[in-house]
Image: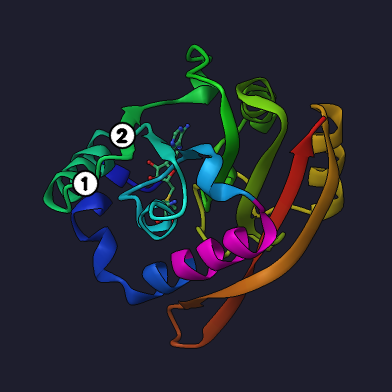
Amino acid sequence: MENFDELALTWDNEPKRIQRAKIVADEIMKAIPGLSEMSGLEYGCGTGLLSFFLQPRLKHITVGDNSQGMLKVLTQKVENAKIKNMSPVMLDLSEGAGIHGQYDIIYTLMTLHHIVDTDKVIDAFSRMLKTSGYLCIADLDKEDGSFHGEGFIGHNGFDQEELTEKLEKYGFDQIKWKICFENIRKSEDGTERKYPLFMMIGKRI
Ligand SMILES: C[S@@+](CC[C@H](N)C(=O)[O-])C[C@H]1O[C@@H](n2cnc3c(N)ncnc32)[C@H](O)[C@@H]1O
């Protein structure tokens, strides 16, 4: 399993992660009207790459993660940039943490596959969203397990039909998805493999 506290220190050194966050931010900005009136939550924000791209467009963003290390780097970045509309919080919805506010939009990038009990977290998203609020999930397409390799206990990506059904079960409709990016990883033998990233958007009924 990844040690995100440790990874936090060099997380932003990887240009592909920044490029991925920018592409996902652009998709959100294209797809969701009225962002400037919205308060958002990013779940599993890491160092905040995605939210830094969205921050000029949203009224306020709560940036939540369960890694102290990620939150430390993120808080420093927010302070250095003197950003007033981003609030970092320790948040782990898979641990049954209390509901943290009511949002117009919740978004998450490359985090859901790390959560074993996705029902718990999607249920929490649903309860934390206002009626007609948006949920945006950007995550790995179903893969063969080679993205993380042996010992990983999360999900090997997601089948979009199954995830759509799950979102419907927790009160979302108008669900749409598209492939928006390709993660590229080098295997030990030097060959490159592509792992598509999908963006799914649903509206809270
Ligand atoms: C692959 S990283 C993605 C970080 C960021 N979204 C990005 O794209 O740069 C996954 C993030 O999810 C966080 N995470 C993993 N499990 C979590 C949980 N149960 N609750 C909250 N955050 C979690 C990790 O700490 C990490 O920051």
Asked whether residue 35 appears in the rendered view, the answer is yes
Q: Main secondary structure of the magenta part?
A: helix
- Side (left or right) of 151 relative to 121: left
Residue toward you, 65 or 134: 134
- Side (left or right) of 120 relative to 162: left
Q: Which residue occupies 41% across, 26% down?
A: 91
The answer to whether the beta carbon of the residue marked 1 is less than 8 Å from any atom of ligand 1 is no
Q: Whole-percent x and y of residue 153?
A: 55, 41
Identify the mark nearer the N-term, 2 or 1: 1
Q: Whole-percent x and y of residue 46?
A: 35, 47
Q: Which residue occupies 57% across, 65% down?
A: 146
Residue toward you, 90 or 6: 90
Residue 160 included in the magenta stretch of the image: no
Secondary structure at badge 1 equals helix
| 80 is higher (above) or lower (below) than 85 | below
Q: Whole-percent x and y of residue 94?
A: 54, 24
Q: Quadrant of the N terminus?
A: top left
Task: Specify start and end residues of the magenta stretch as a single range.
Answer: 21-33
Which residue matches tag 1?
78
| 117 is higher (above) or lower (below) than 43 | above
Q: Whole-percent x and y of residue 51?
A: 41, 51
| 197 is higher (above) or lower (below) than 159 | below
Which class describes the residues within 10 Å of circle 2: few (<14), some (14-19), or many (20+)? many
Amino acid at dot 2 = Pro
Amino acid at dot 1 = Val
For ligand 1, give the image quadrant: top left
Q: Quadrant of the C terminus?
A: top right
Q: Looking at the rendering, which quadrant does residue 105 occupy? A: top right
Which residue matches tag 2?
88
Callouts 2 and 1 close, C-beta under 8 Å = yes
- Side (left or right) of 125 relative to 200: left
